[in-house]
Amino acid sequence: MKTRVNRRTCLKGLACGAAAAALGGGSRARLWAAESTGSRATLDVLLDEQIREPDGKPAVISPMLHGHFTEHIGGVIYDGIWVGPDSKVANVDGIRKALVESFKKIAPPVVRWPGGCFADRYHWRDGIGPAANRPRRFNRWSERVEPNAFGTHEFIRFCRLVGAEPYLAANVGAGTVEEFQQWVEYCNAPAGSTTLADERAANGAADPFKVRFWGVGNENWGCGGTYTPEDYCTEYRKFTTWVPKYGVPLYLVACGPNGGDVSWTRRFLKKWRDAATAPISGFSGHYYCGSSGTATQFSTAQWYDLLDRANYMETFINEHWTAMGEFDPKHEIKLIVDEWGCWHPTGTEIRKEFDFCQISTLRDAMVAGLTLDTFHRHADKLSLCAVAQLVNNLHSLYLATDDKCVETTNYHVFDMYRDHQNGTAVPIRVAADPVAFSLDGKDRKIFRVAGSASVRDKQLTLTLTHTHASEPIELAIKLAGGAKLAELACTVLTHDKLNAANTFETPAEVIPRDLPVDKPRPDGSLALTLPPASVTRLQMTLA
C-alpha cells in the first residue's frame, strides 16, 4: 500500500517502517532493480562478497577519496583560508582559526593547491621568503592582483594544522622542468643537504616538508597549455623521468581528461606506453556536474536533472578505467578525480566581490552524498579525489567573511561519511522503482535510492541518498550471510525545503539529526523510512 506522507509530516515523525522482503542475488552494477516495488525498496548488504582490487585483494576505501581542493580564485585563499597574522579575525599564523578548528574535525586526508588553472601560471618562488619582499603578480583567472602572501610555507602550515597531506600542482603551462624539480628539492631535500634546503631552513622550515603528491600540470588540454594528449605526454616525460626523490616516495599524477573525453585518455596512454620511461602513479580526470536552474532557484524537475548529472560520475569512472586498462592491463595506474562538484550559473554569489562564491543548498549536499558513495563503490579503481572547492567557491564546505565561518550542507555530508575511511568496501544491491520526471519536453527517470557500505573492525557503515523530492520510502535492509547486529544508530540530513541552505544569517538551517531506530528483526533485517530528499548514515556494530 502506498503511504501518503508529505515531506513535512515525514520530517516531524520519522519512524522505522514495517517489514519488507529483501532480494537475493544480482549484480552490484545496477542502482535499481527492474521490477516494481512501489513506495517500498529493498537493500541487500552483500557482506559475503567483496569489491576487489585488480590484484585480487579486498578494496579498502582510502581516506584520500575524501580530499579537498583550494585555488587562488575568488575568496578561496584570501579571506577564506588566509586573513593575515595582523587581522582582527582570530587566526593561527594568518590562517583563519575557525576554519582550522572545524576542518580538522572531519579528518581531511589531502588538500590540493595552488590550482586549478592558477597552477599553470604560478611560480613557486614568488611565494617564499619574507612577505614584504614577495612580488605582486596579476592573477589572470581572478582578474586581480596576487599578493603572494599565501605561498608554499603557508600552505604546508595549513595542512599541518588540519592534519592533511599536501598535494602540489606544478606549473607545466608556463613553467620549466628545472622549476618543478627545484620545487621538489626545496620541499623535500634533507636539512643541510643542498642550497635550496638551506634556503627553506632560512625561511623557517629546517625539516623537509616531505610532499608525496605532485600533480604535473592541470587541465593541460585547456587552461594548462591547450596541449594535444601526445604533446602533453612529451612534456610529462620531461618533467618526471629524472625527478629526484630525496627519500620521499613521490606519487606523480598525470593530467587526464575533461569529463567524458575518453579519446584523451587513450591517446595520452598510447603515447606513454610506446616509451614508458616516465613514472605515473595516478591519472587525473575532472568532472563537474554543472547545474540545472541556479544555485538556489530550481524546479523539482531541475532537482532531479542535477542529481542525474551527478550520477554520470559512475559512467565517467567506468569508461576511463576501461580505457586505461587497454594500455595498463595490470591497472598499476589508478584513476584520480581531483576536481568534482556542482558549478552553478553566476549571479547568485553570496559575496559579489568573489567569483563563484555560491551558496550550497540541500541539493548540493545530495550531489556530495551521491558522489562519495560512487567513489566508495569504485574503491578498487580510485586512489585520490578532491571536491572543488573548500571555501567561498563552488560546492564549498565553508562560507567565510570577517569573523564568520559557516559550515555548509556539504560539510555535514563529509562529516557523516568519514566513518567509511579505511573500511573494506562492501557491495550493496538496491531494488527500488526509479523516479520519473519530465524536463524540456522529455520524459526521464532517475534512480530513487543509492548508497555504499563498508566494514571496519566489526563496524558496518551504510550511507544512502534518497532522491525523491516529496515522498518518503520504506526501506527493508538485509545483511547477507546471516550477519546479526549488536548496535545500530541512524543520522539523517534533510529539510522540508529543497533549496534550504546554511548562510551567514542562518548558519544551522540544515544540520544532521540523530534518529531513533527500531531494533533489528530476529532474522537480522531491519526496516527504515527514508525521508524525501535526504542523506542518511547507518552505523551498525556486527555481533
Image: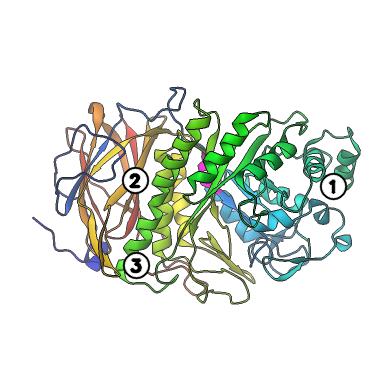
Dot 1 surroundings within 10 Å: few (below 14), some, or many (20 or more)? few
Residue at the extreme left:
1
Residue on which disc 1 sits: 204
Report helix, strand or loop for mark 3. Answer: helix
Q: Amino acid at mark 3?
A: Gln
Q: State the image coordinates of residue 86 (x, y, percent, origin top left).
A: 78, 66
Which mark identifies residue 302? 3
Disc 2 to disc 1, C-alpha distance: 46 Å
> Split into 4 quadrants, where in the image is the N terminus?
bottom left
Report helix, strand or loop for mark 1. Answer: loop
Looking at the picture, tell me which residue is in the foreground, 537 or 326.
326
Q: State the image coordinates of residue 255 (x, y, percent, origin top left).
A: 61, 45
Which mark identifies residue 451? 2
Looking at the picture, tell me which residue is in the foreground, 341 or 537.
341
Decide which of tag 1 and tag 3 comes sooner along the chain: 1
Q: Amino acid at mark 2?
A: Gly
> Split into 4 quadrants, where in the image is the C terminus?
top left
Q: Which residues are magenta?
A: 63-67
Residue under the image location 40 percent in, 74 percent down: 297
Dot 2 surroundings within 10 Å: few (below 14), some, or many (20 or more)? many
Residue under the image location 44 percent in, 23 percent down: 57
Instruction: Check if residue 151 falls in the magenta segment.
Output: no
